[in-house]
Amino acid sequence: VGNLGVQSFGLRQLRDRWLISWNGEADLVLGGVAYEYPFHWLYGASGTAHGEGGWRILPAHSISPYLGAGLDAALSAVTEPGVAFDAGTMINDLDGLGGVIGTGDVRLALGVSFLGPRQSLLIEAQPLAEIDSAQSNLPFLDYLGGALHARYDRRDSLVAIGEASYAVTPAQQDAALGTSSTSSRWSLSGSVVKKLAHHWFVGGGLSVSRTATQLDYASGLDYATDTPVEARFSLLAGYWP
């Protein structure tokens, strides 16, 4: 799958003690997914956004404890030729590529920040609350969990972001069937963008995740199911004004 779009990322210091960081992009999407015949040709658009504001408790020091809060959002509208965008629940979601799919979360942050003349580093522990829209084979889900997050910025040169997270849904009761179910998900992700020469940049990203579901019956029996580990990688090249 190929994407063509715009991206913005940065970190700014305000009034000595406040930090604002962001990372967002909007893309047109065109490509295909091949498991077994028939193949699925896709087109559409996608976007992601992350924003965080934080307080450096000791602003006069290059290394300081850090408190923050942030928001994340992602939305994609991708479909096959001849299939309406809003018919996403009628086709397989193609591992999150097809249909209209959205996620969002709210995070708190507690960690440490380093702020130098040309570079910065944030390392954070983040409790989070997330909501995921329904897909063709999954209902609407909300998760509670936490993440370890790190971000390194070198002014006008390099941005590197890494994260490890784990989250679980509250128990969902079904009185008619006498069952209680929970879903859990862990993920690892990392991305790097490097500026070359004066205006060109390259980058890459990798994410690995796995989701598991636990179903408990009133009789005392239980059943666990999980999906294979899902891995995605991306390559990026572009022009930096």
Image (tube, rainbow, N blue to C red):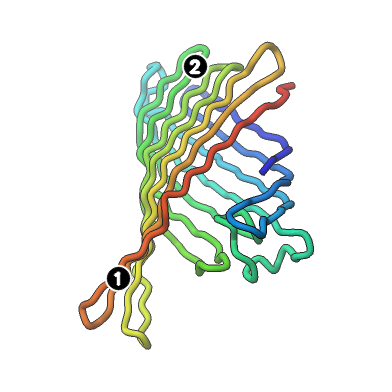
Question: Which numbered circle lies on residue 223?
Answer: 1
The vertical placement of 230 against 64, above or below, is below
Asked if residue 14 can be seen in this view, the reply is no
Give the percent coordinates (x, y) of residue 42.
Answer: 71, 53
What element does badge 2 sit on?
strand
The vertical placement of 190 against 153, above or below, is below
Q: Looking at the picture, which amino acid does disc 2 mark? A: Gln
- Of the residues tagged 1 and 2, which is closer to the observer? 1
Give the percent coordinates (x, y) of residue 202.
Answer: 63, 24
The image quadrant that residue 94 belongs to is: bottom right
Q: Nearer the viewer, residue 110 or 121?
A: 121
Q: Looking at the picture, which amino acid does disc 1 mark? A: Tyr
Q: Is residue 5 left or right of residue 12?
A: right
| Residue lying at 68% horizontally and 56% vertically, measured from the top left | 40
Question: Which numbered circle lies on residue 119?
Answer: 2
Q: Nearer the viewer, residue 227 or 13?
A: 227
User: The C terminus lies in which quarter of the figure?
Assistant: top right
